[in-house]
Amino acid sequence: MHSIQVYIDEKLDEQSLNELKQFMQGLPHVTNVEINTAQPHDLLVEYEEHFNIPMLIMDKLHHKGLHPDIISG
């Protein structure tokens, strides 16, 4: 299993974070999404190791109008 940690510039409320989590978990090959409520800008996305999807994740977040950065992979 692989994971990336994404920093989102925008400040999202709890409902928006939950909607984002559900959206991300619906992407192909994404196995888990965790949001740290103490640091709501951070998003951890785990995905199947045989798939290289960090750029797909970034693209999907950009299309939602967000400004993400990968801070670890």
Image: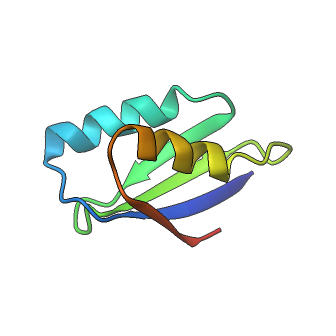
Front residue of 38 and 40: 40
Q: Quadrant of the C terminus?
A: bottom right
For image coordinates 22% across by 67% down, the residue present is 38
Q: Position of residue 63 (x, y in %)?
A: 42, 38
Q: Is residue 5 left or right of residue 22?
A: right
For image coordinates 59% across by 61% down, the residue present is 4
For image coordinates 72% across by 55% down, the residue present is 2
Q: Is residue 35 left or right of residue 54?
A: left
Q: Position of residue 49 (x, y in %)?
A: 80, 48
Q: How many marks?
A: 0
Give the colour scheme shown: rainbow
Q: Quadrant of residue 29?
A: top right
For image coordinates 38% across by 39% down, the residue present is 21
Q: Position of residue 64 (x, y in %)?
A: 36, 38
Q: Position of residue 11 (x, y in %)?
A: 18, 59
Front residue of 50 and 59: 59
- Location of residue 7 with respect to 31 vertically, above or below: below
Q: Quadrant of residue 7?
A: bottom left
Front residue of 11 and 65: 65
Q: Is residue 65 left or right of residue 28?
A: left
Q: Residue furthest bottom?
A: 71
Q: Residue furthest right?
A: 50
